Image (spheres, rainbow, N blue to C red):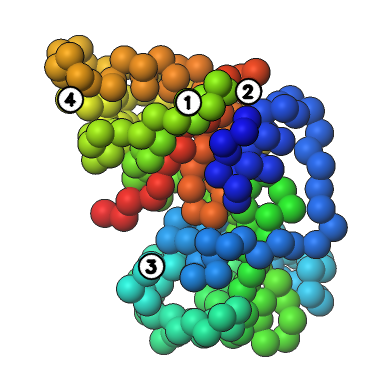
Amino acid sequence: MKRLVATLGLALMAAVSTFGGAMAQDASPVASPAAAGGIPPIVWESNDFLPTVSSGTPGADAITLGSEYWVQFLPDGGFSFRADCNGGFGSYEMDGSSVTLGPLGTTLMLCPDGGRGGEFIDALTSVTSWEIDQSGASDMLVLTTADGTNLTFDAAITGVVWQWSETQMSDDTVVTPNNPEDYYLSFSPDGSVVGQIDCNRAFGSYTTDGSQITMMLATTRMHCGDDSQDTAYALNLAQVTSFVIRDGKLALAMPMDAGIVIYEPVLD
């Protein structure tokens, strides 16, 4: 595709051209241009483990943290997170790649045995720097603590509303929405998805497997007007088979390089 947005291009082309195959990996993280202005305000889910005996090495009783442990950095300097069964909030200060979190507040629920909420919060309060690793299909956030431990987080498709910004087709056609606020998708952790397609509501389910995604959507059937973009948009969406999240944007790709539907996050 000739008109891929530069910072999305490599990841999207890889996701489409190697769909179902192995993904090439770079040896070192690459900081994204968009991230230079701050951490994208999407939800970042932990793919890490606690406790560690040294940077990047799990302890004998370590557990994988997973989706019950996540962070989100908001543009206004606010910060939210989940640590096991407790939610938390606070503020952050950033200066280039340096970042300081806190003070942090949390709910005080008694979580089931085996959780690592306390250790996770302690690690967050000692974070000193950040970077975006773009060596994989989707972005990964790396937070480094004062003792050199890396906390790593995958970009999540859940947690924000994704608003359609444009569709790039293989014939170099670029379609932008007349009314972006009328086209959005919202994915829930339980596998449900809701959205808006112009004047119609969309609802259904989705599953992901790595960078692959399958969506089953139904919609209401109101006529949105002769100038509506709903039909072409819905047809493209029905063909989506893979996705990447790059520089805070979600890109849903159709097979055989047919096209890519791109979204930007909208915070409630």
Residue 111 makes an appearance in the image: no
Q: Is residue 47 left or right of residue 107?
A: right
Classify residue 93 as left or right of residue 36: left
Which residue is at a point 54% across and 65% down the rendered structure image? 35
- Image disc number at residue 257: 2
Disc 1 on helix, strand or loop? loop
Look at the image and tell me in which quarter the C terminus lies: bottom left
Measured in 3D between alpha carbons, the distance from the residue under mark 3 to the one under mark 2, in whole angstroms, is 34 Å
- Please provide percent x and percent y for residue 249: 48, 48
User: Is 263 in front, or is 209?
Assistant: 263
Mark toward the start of the polypeptide (1 vs 4): 1
Secondary structure type for disc 4:
loop
- Disc 4 designates what residue? 199
Nearer the observer, disc 3 or disc 2? 2
Tell me if 31 is positioned left or right of 202 in this view.
Answer: right
In this rendering, the count of numbered labels is: 4
User: Residue flagged by tag 2: what amino acid is it?
Assistant: Asp
Q: According to the image, label 1 marks what residue?
A: 173
N-terminal of the two: label 4 or label 3? 3
* Figure check: 185 above or below 70: above
Q: CA distance from mark 1 to mark 3?
A: 33 Å
